[in-house]
Image: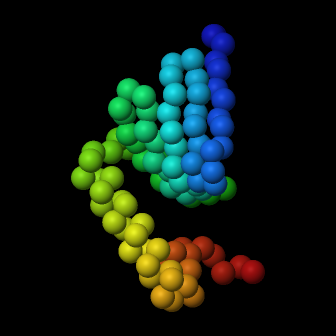
Amino acid sequence: MGFRFRKIISVIPGVKVNLSKSGASTSIGGRGATVNVGTSGKKTVTLGIPGTGLSYQAQLSGLTIMVLLALAAIVGIAWLIAPTYVTAALHWWQPKWF
């Protein structure tokens, strides 16, 4: 067993700087989806279901990042036009218990 060090600094909401003994990285995103870029150039995306502990992590290529940014822009524009439809579409999987 060895000692571990990790410090997370929140820069603005949704953007964090992660410091550890192996280096630094930047995380963009929040609960459910996060893109992480390290100082070594390694880019990863983590997708998960908040509150369950289940997540999937994969490395990103430049094309994948561009597609994710385009998708985020489309969802943002749709939110400005019809926020109720976007909310319903993003939360279709949630159980309707309440």
Q: Residue at x 57, y 48 (%)?
A: 15
- Above/below status of 67 relative to 56: below
| Residue 27, horizontal then vertical, whole percent | 52, 43
Q: Residue at x 56, y 75 (%)?
A: 91
Specify how the rendered protein is coloured: rainbow
Left or right: 68 as drawn, with respect to 22? left
Image quadrant of residue 11? top right
The image quadrant where one finds the N terminus is top right
- Above/below status of 18 relative to 30: above
Q: Residue at x 44, y 74 (%)?
A: 75
Image quadrant of residue 39? top left
- Above/below status of 44 relative to 32: above
Q: Is residue 70 visible?
A: yes
Residue in the foreground of this view, choosing between 11 and 62: 11
Residue in the foreground of this view, choosing between 25 and 96: 25
Left or right: 11 as drawn, with respect to 65? right
Direction left: furthest residue: 63
Direction right: furthest residue: 98
Residue in the foreground of this view, choosing between 55 and 88: 88
| Residue 22, horizontal then vertical, whole percent | 51, 19
| Residue 90, horizontal then vertical, whole percent | 51, 75
